[in-house]
Amino acid sequence: MHLLFIKQMNINLNQICKHFGKLQANDHISLLIPGGTIQGILGENGAGKSTLMKILSGFIQADEGEVILDGVQVRIHSPADAIQHGVGMLHQDPLDFPPMRVIDNFVLGQSGGLFPDWKSVVDEFKQLSEQFDFKLRHDAYVDMLTVGERQQLEILRLLWLGAQVIILDEPTTGISALQKQKLFETLKILAGRGKTVIFVSHKLEDVENLCDRVVVLRQGKLVGEQLKPFNTKNLVNMMFGKSIALEESKSHSTDRIAFELRDLSLEEERIQIQNIDLKIQAGEVIGLAGMEGSGQRPFMQACAGFLRPVHGRILVNGRDMTGMNYPAFKRQGVGYMPASRLEEGMIPGLTLSEHFILAGQQEGLFIDHDQWQEVTREKIRDYNIRGKPESPVESLSGGNQQRALLALLQQPLKLVLLEHPTRGLDIESVIYTWGKLKERCCDGAAIIYTSSDLEEILLYSDRILVFFSGKVSAPLSARGTSVAQLGNLIGGKDWARIKTGVGVTA
């Protein structure tokens, strides 16, 4: 199977409107996207970007407006309907089946019989993979793939099904710098061969580096459009209606030791981490940097009591917590926020209010729903969550789910463990979120967090631990480290020049 040049598909969205109750997610949006281009859709969280793309890809239907493809008005009632018209969407959280093999996921959505010609399918999969230099094994299981590899699988599947338009919703969330580079190379190849790529993001840098043109949504309205070369200041003003500037991060660390690891060794699947000694001061922020799968997650899980160490001690405020479970750690003031929002962090089907009830301290036998409604409203205000107490958590945008997870962390805390705390957040929300986290530091909490954004790691951390293939660096001063130096260490270079986790102390 070969990916040939095709007739370019032009897209015209005309006066699209969509309401969710009283919320107008899309307000008379009109947009023309020429074929063979990479179109950016930029906007803050909750601006209506994903809603508009879900309408185009058939996941939801517009209340008003028209979808016109190559001059022909079409009715798209489902994702299967959309792919028949040549439109496919890659979602922020890949819609695949991890327990199944790569090749089984590849054929999902195909028309025809229940029993495909597997030899032909495997041959076509390999030929298509080779065109983009993807290193995917057809017989591997999806749950062994990285997020970037799962994206590659979904792109191949959509192309195999005949997609001429590929929509990507926040695709750089949760992937490494190298995976992002590979993704951008792939999208440029697709556009060069006549495919139309729609790139949905809140990240200015990604849009400016990749896209040919960009439109900006704010509060459900299309407020502006730019062609390359882009004016960053104007894009920011269109996104937020004002200028946004990053403030220099301040350290709040004290002399008191809040958390300590003594000669800690861990084992999980293919990762072994050995002999870590680390002292973290109250109010200090420790950033964990490294490629996905390099050991950060088992390290964080051990610090929270989810993973038992094979050797060594874990102390919280001087108390030995080695071998205890997460509820015991939680009682000692340790809070953990996982990267998977709906899979691990929250319960789909429950409302925001019900989540705060579950996370809170219950007095007596009966739940005072009025009291918890007020608590939820207060949290919504404090964390700028765009939702209501009765909103099911799965109805919130990814960024609002992230804010809700932060709001669910108990008060007070001695140690806050966060996996990708600003994943999916726009610039203003990142600044706001770190402001809330720094408030925890002012109250004496230490923070350990992971991030794939090297600039975030350098800006908000006091010290940094770098992970590579189970090796852990000694703490590096964030102020004395550059993006280039950090990138080299993450890629496995320059390790001879630094100390490893043996003797990692304050």
Image (cartoon, grey):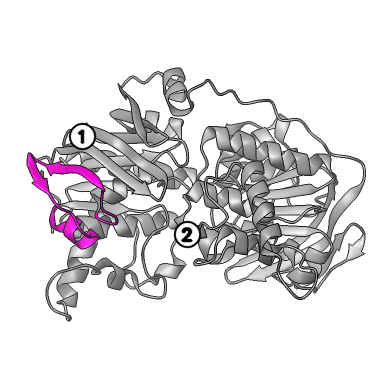
Of residues 351 and 212, the one nearer the viewer is 351
Percent of width and height locating residue 133: 30, 52
Q: Secondary structure at mark 1?
A: strand
Q: Is residue 228 left or right of residue 261?
A: left
Percent of width and height locating residue 223: 35, 26
Percent of width and height locating residue 460: 68, 36
Of residues 194 and 268, the one nearer the viewer is 194
Question: Which dot marks residue 394?
Answer: 2
- Callout 1 crowding tier (Cα within 10 Å): few <14, some 14–19, many ≥20: many
From this view, report whether residue 181 is shown above or below residue 124. above
Q: Which residues are magenta?
A: 58-85
Rendered-image quadrant of the N terminus: bottom left
Question: Which dot marks residue 89?
Answer: none
Q: Is residue 159 magenta?
A: no
Give whichever of discs 1 and 2 has the lower sequence position. Answer: 1
Which residue was labeled with disc 1? Answer: 33
- Callout 2 crowding tier (Cα within 10 Å): few <14, some 14–19, many ≥20: some
Q: Secondary structure at mark 2?
A: helix
Q: Residue at x 44, y 37 (%)?
A: 202
Q: Say whether residue 77 is visible.
A: yes
From this view, report whether residue 332 is shown above or below residue 236. below
Percent of width and height locating residue 412: 81, 52
Q: Quadrant of residue 405?
A: bottom right
